[in-house]
Image: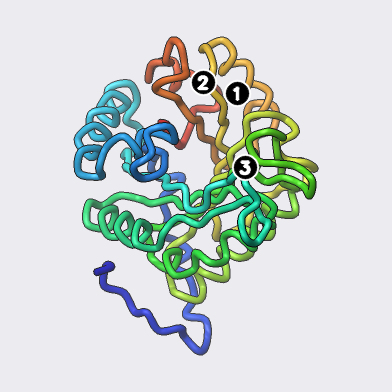
Amino acid sequence: MLPSQNTSTPEAPIGMRMNEGLLPDHRLIMYYGFPENPNMGILGEFSPEELLPKLQAQKEAYEAVINDRPWKMGFELIASVAQRDPGADGKYIADTGGEWLDMYTQFTEENDMYLLLDVQCGLKTPKEDYEGLERWLRYDHVHLAIDPEFHVLPGETPGIELGSIDASDVTEAQEWLLDIANKYGTSRKMLLIHQFNVYSISNKENIKPMEGVDLVLNMDGWGAPHLKNETWNVIIQQNPIEFNGIKMFYRQDDPLMTPEDIMALEPTPDVINYQ
């Protein structure tokens, strides 16, 4: 059973709680992945119950470095998985089962955590992919992430060709989240955009903060510390927009950057994400 919440659709907007939200008053540390698939992140290696003390220990390692804002914990769950087979609809995408989204929604609510639902899009437009998540985004602690790497063009295949989104897709998602927040009377929603290369987001200069949505640009991609520092400088430092995050890879990053390394970045990350 999901957390207690009014499930009826209001006839008129309730209005969001504009003064309530995660950022900038807190920092967020998350685990990323897909249930029961260890090749798609740490969420697939352990159950939520097993992950909770591991994430708590990782959070404490960051608190020992910098604790200027309270740290919150969360999971980023892949809600639509890009495929190399076009599937029946030809969209190269498969939705994660609703029972998984229900379970993670309830677990994170019960443990005072945040849940980000990540869409990979395939040949769908980003909005076509995430608008089906309204059922879960109506919960106060559930937010949205978009992974441009797997959003491809006709004739391309996710995982072979590298995808991208446009700044207009980001603006559209911000506007949609505002509508969701107003419709269900939630606090500010968070929109996290993964980016590992300059071409992941076209016309990036057109992306602007939008009142009522906390926009996080999350530096993605694995590699040695010097490579991740270089990517951070290009993607984040040279083009800051609002809030910033970085994704770490327990298996592929060699060596793994320490919390001291990460919190020494400029600007200091607001969100840390471990795959």
Residue 223, given in percent of the width and then of the height, sits at 54, 16
For this view, does 132 lie left or right of residue 100? right
Along the polypeptide, which appears first: circle 1 or circle 3? Answer: 3
* Quadrant in which residue 205 is drawn: top right
Crowd band around label 3 with a 10 angstrom C-alpha radius: few (<14), some (14–19), many (20+): some
Q: Name the residue carrying label 2.
A: 265
User: Height in image: 46 above or below 207?
Assistant: above
Mark 2 to mark 3: distance in Å?
36 Å
Q: Nearer the viewer, residue 252 or 165?
A: 252
Mark number displayed over residue 232: 1
Residue at image point 34% right, 62% down: 99
Mark 2 to mark 1: distance in Å?
8 Å
Mark number displayed over residue 47: none
Q: Name the residue carrying label 3.
A: 84
- Quadrant of the rendering where the N terminus is positioned: bottom left
- Label pair 2/3, CB-CB below 8 angstroms: no
| Total numbered circles | 3
Q: Answer yes or no: is residue 204 visible.
A: no
Crowd band around label 1 with a 10 angstrom C-alpha radius: few (<14), some (14–19), many (20+): many
Along the polypeptide, which appears first: circle 2 or circle 1? Answer: 1
- Label pair 2/1, CB-CB below 8 angstroms: yes
Q: Answer yes or no: is residue 202 visible.
A: yes
For this view, does 87 lie left or right of residue 14? right
Q: Which amino acid does label 2 sit on?
A: Leu
Q: Which amino acid does label 3 sit on?
A: Arg
Q: What residue type is labelled 1?
A: Trp
Crowd band around label 2 with a 10 angstrom C-alpha radius: few (<14), some (14–19), many (20+): few
